Image (cartoon, rainbow, N blue to C red):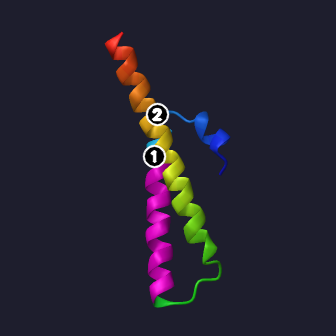
Amino acid sequence: MKSKEYRDFTKPELDDKLRQLEEELFKLKFQAKTAKLDKPHKITLIRRDIARIRTFLRQLELKEKVKGEN
């Protein structure tokens, strides 16, 4: 998914998507160790998506913190 698409998500949606991607990453890593993966680059793509989501979650957290201080 592109970064622009994640910007429109709410915090609960981002949390849910993060959980889904982490589960998928776990399954892919398990398959990579036990059997042959058809698309090994998919692990890299999912890791990047997880990083994007965590970045957006952190940005939301910082925005809320700044709003609380003002």
Q: What secondary structure is marked by label 1?
A: helix
Three-letter code for the amino acid on which mark 1 is drawn: Arg
Whether the magenta-drawn stretch holds residue 47 is answered as: no
Q: Nearer the viewer, residue 33 or 17?
A: 33
Q: Mark 2: few, some, or many residues within 10 Å (few <14, many ≥20)?
A: few
Above or below residue 3? Residue 50 is: below
**Residue 60 percent coordinates (x, y):** 45, 31
Q: Which residues lie in the magenta part? A: 17-33
Above or below residue 34? Residue 42 is: above
- Furthest-top residue in this view: 70
Q: Residue at x 44, y 44 (%)?
A: 15
Q: What secondary structure is marked by label 2?
A: helix
Above or below residue 36? Residue 66 is: above
Per the image, the residue denoted by label 1 is 54
Q: Nearer the viewer, residue 44 or 18?
A: 44
Q: Residue at x 46, y 51 (%)?
A: 18
45 relative to 53 in the view: left or right: right
Q: Which mark is residue 59?
A: 2
Q: Residue at x 59, y 41 (%)?
A: 6
Q: Residue at x 60, y 78 (%)?
A: 40
Three-letter code for the amino acid on which mark 2 is drawn: Gln
15 relative to 40 in the view: left or right: left
Whether the magenta-drawn stretch holds residue 19 is answered as: yes
28 relative to 66 in the view: left or right: right
Name the quadrant containing residue 22: bottom left
Q: Quadrant of the C terminus?
A: top left
**Residue 11 percent coordinates (x, y):** 46, 35
Instruction: Give the dominant element type of the magenta stretch: helix, strand or loop.
Output: helix
Above or below residue 65? Residue 6 is: below
